[in-house]
Image: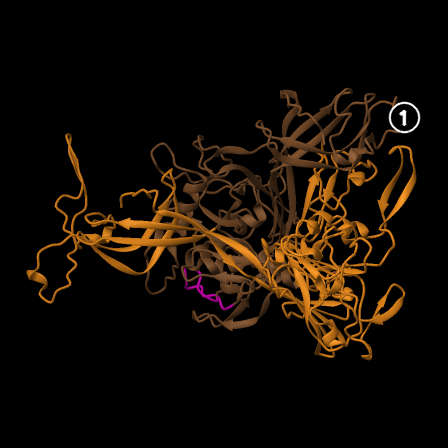
Chain colours: A brown, B orange
Amino acid sequence: MATTFKTFLNNDVTTTKTLLHEAIPITGAIMSGTYSTGKLDDGAGHGMVPTEFNIKNYSHGMFQSVYDYPFLSSSANHILDISVGYSANSNLSGNVGESGAGTNYAQQEKKIAMYNQMAQVLMGHDRNGNIQRFDRDGNLAETADDKMDEVVFLNFSRLLVKDEIKKGSFTIKFGTEQAMVTADLNKESGTDHILTIQDTNAQNDFRINSPAGEYGILSASHTAKAGNQCIIEGRTSTTAPHNSDKVGLIFYQAGVVVLTASIFNGHTATAATFGAGKGGGLLNQAVSMSIGGVHGGFSAAHKHGAPGQTDADINMMLTGSKIQNIANNIRKRLFDISFNNTTELNSTVYFCRANHNEFNYSANPSYLQSSKIRVKDVPSDMPISYVTSVGLYSPDNELMAVAKLSEPLRKDPTNELTLRVRLDY
Amino acid sequence: MPFREFGKNDLFYNQIKTFPKSDFIINKGLVYYNGNRNVATDDGNGTMRDRVAPQNFISLFELNVNRQIDTGTDAPPDGKSIYPFITKDGARIAFKTVSTSEFDTSSQFAYGDVIKGDYPLTSSIKRIYFSETSVPFAEINNSERFQGSFLKLTNNKRFINSLKNSFNQYVYTSHHFSFDDTTNPYASATDDEGVHGWDKAKQYASLVEIPSIFYGSSIRKGSVVLQVFYTGSLAAECRDIKKDGELIQVSGTFDATKNANKVAGTVLYNEGFVHMTGSWSITNGLAGATAAVDGGTEAIKWYNFAMGANDGNTTDAKISFRLSFEGINFVPSITMMAHAPKGEFNNSTNPTVYTKAQVKDPETSATRYQEFKDLQFVKLEHSDYASTGSYEKQTYISKVGIYDDQKRLIGIAKLANPIRKTEDREYTFKLKLDI
């Protein structure tokens, strides 16, 4: 025990910030497949549909939750929520409120409300109080129509995101085999046609004009260089081209990924693309989707997707299918997700300096034996002590913390010590 | 609705005291926690896990549930399971599993290298056995650095010696906590059946470590029960019947009268340790009721207690140990009194408060802007003669919103049934929030 206090000076105290990361791999098998036990009647008139016990659907139907284990178990962790939405500016919103024979519109208002709710939180409002729509490049000032009006939302849980997603680490892959059966990644097929979406170089190039924090631009690449599923850049049509370098946004602190639904759609209205809102997509041809992953017959008479319909594209699903059914299709096509999260560790480092003429004596009762210094045999030798711990005191001399050394350090007038004490919080 | 600020007498900060119970059965080198028998499978690395953790361990966050633990060999994101990593830098922060020397060795980790950990973080009880020794330490003579000789603890004696101060601070409750009773001036031959004069650093002993995740703030005094079973029948039992930390034999089959009321060990309630030193036989003469100790075989004694609890040992299947206790865990809670006084909260901004089929467009002109002129409220009648009663301002309170000092909604309390609020009624809603 030292007999004196030594006051810290300005140069003796510094703060540091260390970033702790976690690698988060989410395989497609967890998203769909691992916890399927067969088919059950969903009670909604769709007949026997696959039942997955790690997928939670809600009566409000606004989103679908994915767990890493059957959610009725206390061992389950919430991974993410999936939802979709489109803007009131979208061509798909023209039939809101329609109903009747030959039409099949589902949850139109909810999808618009979902888009607006997410957009106002993530993108904010403009000077007139209007909700900012999701912008492909994050440049809200430019006049070019590069808005994403039909989007898929992936809201990751705070358990996985922690303080934020590490910029430049996010990757999500989808199987884009045109037919749903071959794109079912649980069957270990469909891997020839993988659409990879990443926030490449986002650590050096991200946006800060969101009220929800920083966000990056997601770009896409594809394993197929030709054929129906290859990416078609800069198509000519009545709407803006959907280029592969801007297919979505990732909000790092919020832990939300916004993907344009056009990544599942064909680039023109020709060929084998289906339904209303034709084309406008990233791929050569649209991928096929169906309600609950169940394939049924396609009715050409239906303008929009119907339950059990095989050849529904994403636009038809957006107008004619429930959010949870669209989420089912997206999960089926999900190959994997990978990102690193970040937790900030703040530390204060105290440099405790023992000069040559300091702390060479101890007030510890065991320092003396028979009125002699225990560690010194010859009276003429230099004073000597062994430092075993460092006490940190408040300005009014109250002991606040004790730092212990792994082994005692010898201190005598011939040496000086600087003990680096780090306090994490 | 208007805001109403909580007064100084409206907020109460309390804590709920809970007693989580834990029960461990140790049999044939396996531990069963709270009666669960794990259906363990190989996690791909040779460790048997039941979904999330090895047998009898509990997982801290239950990450990587039911999946192979694979942190990969390359830089992240290589690997199939969730794992933490950190970059070695001047802050010198690493995981606890990385020692200082490993951290400093550049052949292991250079600055800028990624240091990986793994999940899940798990916990369970562990037993440490101490052999009897004449001295717990050895003298080291070859240290120039430490100016000659010094004493170094041998084998695993450091685990018991590190608890010396913890034991000694409870001597005021029982002299059995005295770490070194040979120098205890209060040791008495008449105290406690004449047992005295021990040194815990030298004794045969079994130390059971109980991580705090199993009990919370401390173990509940008097709740610890230790039992030894032979082929399913109780052979001996210890309890802290005086609630002072002494584990006293209250039941036994061998030499029951002689060994009754003997102190077989102590329990450190705040630190989570059970220390058993009782050296009398409790299964003498029973076939298979033996333990392999220090190269020999002997009947089960209390200092063999919990043999097989993650200590690498095992016992005959006929012998089972049971350790049960209750913890003390505090759950902080806030109680908020939300008042709806007379004459307040009698109006609503809910659109349904107005009668239907009214024009709600505001009137605008060059000089004024007027909203909802002469709109009629819905008349909520509770009389058989609805048309004759006079109008009375009233609402139905269905929920209470809690706002922070920045007027941000941070919580909503919902009522089971809406409550009618008239001008002459006043209510207080009691909201309780566990935090």
In this rendering, is residue A119 above or below B242?
Answer: above
Q: Amino acid at mark 1?
A: Val
- Main SS class of the magenta portion in the image: loop
Q: Nearer the viewer, residue B394 or B324?
A: B324
Please tell me whether mark 1 sits on a helix, a strand or a loop: loop
Occupied quadrant, residue B282: bottom right
Q: Across the whole image, how many numbered discs are drawn on residues?
A: 1
Q: Residues within 10 Å of mark 1 (few under 14, many from 20)?
A: few
Q: Nearer the viewer, residue B94 or B353?
A: B94
Whole-percent x, y for residue A286 in the image: 54, 53
Whole-percent x, y for residue A137 in the image: 51, 36
Occupied quadrant, residue A320: bottom left
Q: Residue A305 magenta-drawn?
A: yes
Q: Residue furthest right?
A: B142
In this rendering, is residue A330 above or below B37?
Answer: above
Tell whether B397 sits left or right of A108. Answer: left
Occupied quadrant, residue A398: top right
- Kindly tell me whether residue B81 is visible in this rendering: yes
Give the residues drawn in magenta, as a range.
A296-308
Whole-percent x, y for residue A128 in the image: 33, 33
- Kindly tell me whether residue A304 is visible in this rendering: no
Disc 1 chain ID: A
Whole-percent x, y for residue A225 in the image: 65, 47
Residue drawn at (67%, 61%) of the image: B246
Q: Residue A87 magenta-drawn?
A: no
Q: Mark 1 — residue?
A: A378
Q: Nearer the viewer, residue B12 or B220?
A: B220
Tell whether B202 sits left or right of A285. Answer: right
